[in-house]
Structure formats: structure tokens, C-alpha cells
């Protein structure tokens, strides 16, 4: 009990640690929320060359087209603007019945702008569309990027804070010979290690509440599944990652060595486990490996419960993966553990 | 074969050997420490003191030899032993973020029959620093806190490994007072040191250790008396002049002579006879003194006479 209390005190007296655990994920989520907020599609700047036949007419047709910002420029400055990317397409009218488009085919934005420009010019010249069309826009909660991201952020944070806090705490104590000093007392060694896991649980609750609260109440991410199941997954994931943290910490003598090792363990999961983008983007041959990663299991199950309202029956394979990590990492870590 | 006559021992070590690769840190070391005494392991750095004390503390396993602490063995009764021992390691950095009081409360929580935190804080004179974080303590205060952590479990046997190394004179005296107070309660202390004054001041008995072996054992007084010298005379000559050691040994009252870094050291029995004789000898040889000092022999001189090296040389 005293040991757990000590963990909490040590943590809260380290302002940086508090920030990286709670502040940083919230800032990250906030930043992404701003970046991916719902807003009208950004207008693309295009240029029209002035002082050539047909340029006034082209300008009239383009001005007022949704999604375009029209810039009228003399030829030489227009070419420069195109080259530096401040306009996406340069329109060079050639009389009333011909036009040249200059643009970079490799830029998606430029290709889109060319289509918009062309449509506006053709319509301005009197084209009528043979097919009627109707558009409906996708902005339903649950399918936006931020909806995808919030469960991944939670998973990443559970992993990072579990692995770092344990690896750093244990190795720091070892490098200062505090671990050796503690083993010279009647202290129970199991209780010492347990104190790290227990203190993690308290932070865990705070992390889950902070990230989910931001997601649900500020960013409008839906919460379709059971909160209890979410909490259960977070708990299991936190234990599994604690085991991995203990494994990282089991032998390293210096904090530097431990942090290198932790990065080695964490980095592949940041990439492969679908935090920032779906892990299905990787080739199929990678799938079994990716699915066996604890962070993939965490993210997939959190996402399924949160966004699709999945029940325990739907996420049991992921829970099984996390349990397996837990059952392997803890005994192995205890076996390898060096008290000095 | 009966051990009826032998008094109980707080600590008994027989034939201790510990090797690290090619280096033999402890080479067949024996110790007997009786309840209530303060026992000092005195020797230069690298003599095997820390390895020995850590084996006694159950933190290092010996390659061979037997250790009995408070009548028990580490391999059988580790948990019970830990309850009865207080240990201060040579270098432990306690958690910077905790206060003095919190650190002691933590260590106190490990023991089944501890002393109160207040009592221990009082004992090590850290009342003013009670709520200060460890990071804000001076070196001497940290060391006192380390000893307080060793005392809070109410131990019967206290191990102190180089307790005053690197401390200023005032901190050293404060620490010595703490050890003497602990000793005054009739409990046992084993301490290692490479300071002869510390051993002379604190230890009832001293084992001089060199190259992993005990090379002399006894009370500080006995060890010093064993030199058979009442005084040590140290002198140096001007103008880079030299005098042969044999000439010096022939001087009346001189028992031993050695030369160390330009300074001649003589162990003499009767300084009132030896000194005039020495001066006469030097004068006859036309040698001029640059410096002359005499002092009562110390454990340092014992070590020098046993090994031919100074303690500090290592």
C-alpha cells in the first residue's frame, strides 16, 4: 500500500510525466479535431492569363464557381505562380473557342482543379449536361477520421503510459541501486512489482475518462457499445502492456538502455497497429503478424465496441490475444528480472 | 567438539571466497563478531570490504565459505533475517521526489516491528528536514537518512558500508554519534571504512583487510601496541640528500624505518632517546633536516607496517 502511494506521489511530483500522460494525448486529439473539422471543401486557386483573346470571358465563367479562387495575371507572373504552386492550374485562353490548361498532373489538387475549371468554362460556353445528378454528402458521426482516431489514441496511450511508467520506474530504481537497497529489507518483491501495476490502474481510469470524454463530449465521437466492455478492454490491455513494460525493465541497467528497448518494442506497434490509419493498408502477408500485436488487438476491439456497438462475442479474439500477452509477459519478466 | 564454552556470535564467517572473473575479491576470509560490539573492517579501496559485507548482508552469494548471521543462514531464513538487520549500502540514491518523512514511512512499512518515524528522525537529527524532498538534502543529510532507513526497522545488527566516505568533518562526527548511540543500546554494528580515525573512534575491534584476507585482528589499541613503537618519527632531508635505511635502523630506539615519497618514517620505542640519537647521526653525516614531525602510532601505521603501503594508496 505504501509502495503504491509512493508511485502516485512520485508521478504527480514529476510535472513532465503528468503532461505526457494526460496533456499530450488531449492536445494531439484537439489538434487533429481542428485539422479534420467539418468545413466546406477548401477552394483551389487557379490563374487566368490576362490580355489575350478570350481572357475576359474565361474570367467571367470561372468567377463564382464554387471551389475556385480565380487570379487574373499577366503571362510571365502567371507562369511563376504555377511553378511555385500558388495556383494549381493556369488557364491560357486562345480565342473564344479554344483554351490551354497548364498544370502538374502529379498533384491531385491540380487534377481536381482542372476538372472544375473545364466544367465551368464548357458550361459558360453553353454546354448542357445530358445526365441529371443529385449529391449527398458524407459527414455522419462514426465515419469521420476523428472517429477512427479516438479509439486508436486511447489504445496508444494505454500502451505508452504502461510500458514507459513501468520500464522507467523500475530501471531508474535499479540504476540508482534503490532496487538493491529495497531487496535488503523484508519487503515483498512481488508487492513491489505489483505496486507499479496497481498505480497504473489509477492512472488508467483517469486516462480513459479524459480521452473518451474529449472524444464523446467535445468531438461528438459516438459511443455505441457498452462502457463496461470498454473499461474491461482497457483494463486487460493495461495489464498486458504492464507485462511488456516489466519485460522491457527486467534486465536493463540504465534508463537509456531501457528507453531504447521500449522504443524498439513500441515503434512497430505505432506503425502497424492502426493508430493513425487502418492496419488493413498493409499487405495481406503481414496480417497474422499485425493481428498478434497487442496494440492491434486493443485498437480493433475498442473501435468495434465504440463505433459499431460490438458486444463481447464479437471481440473475443482480440481479448484472447491480450490475455495471451499477459500470460506470457508476466511470468517471463519475473523469470528474467534482475534486482540489482 | 562441544561449543558449550564458546559465546554466542552475532556474525560468523568461515573461509569466505568470492571471485569476479579472474579477480579474487575475497580470499578465504574469517570473522567472528560478538553481540554488542562494533566491529570495523579496515582496508584500502579494493581490499574486498564491500564484497564481504554484502555477502554478510545476503545480497551477494559467496563462491565458498559459510556465513551465520544471528545464528541463522541466508539460504534458509532470509525473510526472518531481513527483519532483524539494518543495512546502509555504500551508494544508494533514495527517491528524489519523496520527503524525508515519506521515505522513512515507506521503509518502515516493510518491517513487522519497526520504530516510529518520529523517533528515528529525531535520532538522526533531521527534524528540520522532515518535509524536505530528498533531492534538496546535502550529502551528509542524505547519508544520515540512509542510516535512518537502516534503523527504522529496529534492527539487532547494523551494517554500514563506508558510512562517511565523501562527507565533510561535521557530517562525519554526526554520523559517528548516531552509531555510538545505537551501540549504547547494546546492539551490534559491522562497518567498513578506509578511514583509520573512524575505525579507531567507533570500532571495539578491527580486522585489517588486504587483498581479500584479514591480515590483523584486535582492538585498535592492541593493533597499535603490536607495532611495539611508542612514536612514529617522520622527517625529510634538504637538498635532495639521502640516508640509507640501514643507517637509520641502527640508530638507538628505532625499530623500523621506511621511505615513502621523500619522507622517512621511523617507528621508535623511546622517543626521548631516539630523537637525539637520530639528530646526531644526521649531523655526523652532514645532512640537513628539512622537516621533522612525531606522532603517536595510529592504525594507519599498523597498515603501513603490515603491507608496506599507505591505506590511501589503495
Image: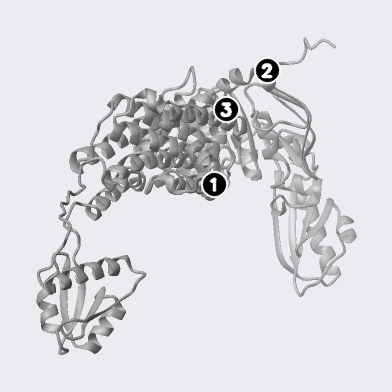
Which residue is situated farthest in the front direction here?
A130
Q: Badge 2 sits on which subunit?
A: B
- Residue at image location 80% in from the left, 42% down from the top: B228
The image quarter containing residue B124 is: top left
Q: Which residue is mark 3?
A: A331
Q: Badge 3 sits on which subunit?
A: A
Residue B269 seen in the current view = no
**Which circle's residue, 3 or 1, is located before the other in the chain?**
1
Q: Badge 1 sits on which subunit?
A: A
- Left or right position of A66 against A207: left
Do the CB atoms of the residues marked 2 and 1 lie less than 8 Å apart? no
The image quarter containing residue A181 is: top right
User: Observer-nearest residue: B202 or B3?
Assistant: B3
* Image spot of residue A221 (x, y percent): 23, 40
Q: Which residue is mark 2?
A: B76
Pointer 2 and pointer 3 on the same chain = no
User: Observer-nearest residue: B290 or A114?
Assistant: A114
| Label 2, label 3: how far apart the Cα atoms are | 24 Å
Residue A259 seen in the current view = yes
* Image spot of residue A264 (x, y percent): 53, 48
Q: Which residue is mark 1?
A: A261
- Left or right position of B218 against A51: right
Which element carries disc 1, helix, strand or loop?
helix
User: Observer-nearest residue: A339 or B86?
Assistant: A339
| Label 3, label 1: how far apart the Cα atoms are | 19 Å
- Residue at image location 76% in from the left, 75% down from the top: B239
Amino acid at each position: 500500500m505504501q509502495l503504491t502511494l509512493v508511485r502516485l506521489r512520485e508521478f504527480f511530483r514529476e510535472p513532465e510525466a503528468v503532461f505526457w500522460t494526460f496533456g499530450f494525448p488531449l492536445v494531439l486529439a484537439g489538434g487533429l479535431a481542428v485539422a479534420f473539422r467539418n468545413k466546406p471543401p477548401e477552394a483551389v486557386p487557379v490563374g487566368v492569363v490576362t490580355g489575350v483573346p478570350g481572357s475576359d470571358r474565361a474570367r467571367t465563367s470561372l468567377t463564382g464557381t464554387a471551389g475556385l479562387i480565380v487570379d487574373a495575371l499577366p503571362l510571365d507572373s502567371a507562369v511563376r505562380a504555377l511553378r511555385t504552386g500558388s495556383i494549381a492550374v493556369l488557364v491560357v485562353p486562345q480565342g473564344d473557342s479554344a483554351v490551354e490548361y497548364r498544370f502538374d498532373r502529379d498533384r491531385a489538387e491540380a487534377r481536381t482543379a482542372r476538372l472544375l475549371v473545364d466544367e465551368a468554362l464548357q458550361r459558360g460556353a453553353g454546354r448542357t449536361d445530358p445526365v441529371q445528378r443529385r449529391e449527398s454528402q458524407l459527414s455522419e458521426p462514426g465515419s469521420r477520421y476523428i472517429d477512427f482516431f479516438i479509439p486508436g489514441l486511447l489504445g496508444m496511450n494505454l500502451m505508452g503510459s504502461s510500458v514507459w511508467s513501468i520500464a522507467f520506474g523500475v530501471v531508474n530504481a535499479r540504476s540508482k541501486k534503490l532496487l538493491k537497497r529495497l531487496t535488503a529489507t523484508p519487503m515483498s518483491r512481488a508487492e513491489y512489482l505489483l505496486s507499479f501495476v496497481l498505480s497504473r490502474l489509477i492512472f488508467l481510469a483517469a486516462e480513459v475518462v479524459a480521452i473518451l470524454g474529449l472524444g464523446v463530449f467535445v468531438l461528438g465521437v459516438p459511443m455505441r457499445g457498452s462502457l463496461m466492455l470498454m473499461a474491461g478492454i482497457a483494463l486487460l490491455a493495461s495489464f498486458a502492456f504492464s507485462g511488456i513494460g516489466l519485460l522491457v525493465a527486467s534486465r536493463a541497467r540504465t534508463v537509456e538502455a531501457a528507453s531504447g528497448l521500449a522504443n524498439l518494442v513500441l515503434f512497430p506497434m505505432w506503425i502497424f497497429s492502426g493508430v493513425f490509419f487502418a492496419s488493413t493498408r498493409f499487405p495481406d502477408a503481414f496480417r497474422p503478424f499485425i493481428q498478434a500485436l497487442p496494440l492491434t488487438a486493443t485498437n480493433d476491439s475498442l473501435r468495434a465496441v465504440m463505433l459499431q456497438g460490438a458486444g463481447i462475442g464479437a471481440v473475443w479474439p482480440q481479448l484472447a490475444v491480450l490475455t495471451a500477452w499477459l500470460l506470457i509477459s508476466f511470468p517471463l519478466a519475473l523469470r528474467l528480472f534482475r534486482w540489482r | 567438539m562441544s561449543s558449550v564454552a564458546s559465546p554466542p556470535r552475532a556474525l560468523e564467517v568461515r573461509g569466505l571466497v568470492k571471485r569476479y572473473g579472474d579477480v579474487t575479491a575475497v580470499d578465504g576470509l574469517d570473522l567472528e563478531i560478538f553481540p554488542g560490539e562494533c566491529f570495523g573492517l579496515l582496508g584500502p579501496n579494493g581490499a574486498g570490504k564491500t564484497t564481504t559485507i554484502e555477502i554478510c548482508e545476503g545480497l551477494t552469494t559467496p563462491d565458498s565459505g559459510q556465513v551465520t548471521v544471528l545464528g541463522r543462514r541466508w539460504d534458509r531464513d532470509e525473510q526472518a533475517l531481513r527483519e532483524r538487520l539494518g543495512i546502509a549500502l555504500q551508494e544508494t540514491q533514495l527517491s528524489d521526489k519523496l520527503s524525508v518523512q515519506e521515505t522513512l514511512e515507506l521503509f518502515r512499512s516493510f518491517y513487522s516491528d519497526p520504530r516510529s518515524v518520529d523517533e528515528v528522525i529525531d535520532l538522526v537529527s533531521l527534524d528540520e528536514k522532515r518535509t524536505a524532498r530528498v533531492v534538496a538534502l546535502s550529502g551528509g543529510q542524505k547519508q544520515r537518512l540512509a542510516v535512518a532507513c537502516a534503523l527504522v526497522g529496529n534492527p539487532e545488527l547494523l551494517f554500514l558500508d563506508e558510512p562517511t566516505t565523501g562527507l565533510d568533518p561535521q557530517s562525519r562526527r554526526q554520523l559517528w554519534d548516531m552509531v555510538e548511540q545505537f551501540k549504547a543500546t547494546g546492539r551490534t554494528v559491522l562497518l567498513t571504512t578506509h578511514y583509520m580515525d573512524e575505525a579507531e573512534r567507533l570500532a571495539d575491534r578491527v580486522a585489517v583487510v588486504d587483498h581479500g584476507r584479514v591480515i590483523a585482528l584486535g582492538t585498535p589499541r592492541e593493533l597499535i601496541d603490536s607495532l611495539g613503537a611508542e612514536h612514529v618519527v617522520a622527517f625529510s632531508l634538504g637538498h635532495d640528500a639521502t640516508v640509507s635505511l640501514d643507517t637509520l635502523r641502527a640508530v638507538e630506539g628505532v625499530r623500523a624505518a621506511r621511505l615513502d615519497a621523500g619522507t622517512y618514517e621511523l617507528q621508535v620505542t623511546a622517543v626521548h632517546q631516539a630523537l637525539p640519537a637520530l639528530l646526531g647521526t644526521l649531523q655526523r653525516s652532514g645532512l640537513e633536516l628539512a622537516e621533522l614531525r612525531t606522532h603517536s602510532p595510529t592504525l594507519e601505521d599498523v597498515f603501513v607496517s603490515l603491507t608496506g603501503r599507505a591505506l590511501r594508496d589503495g
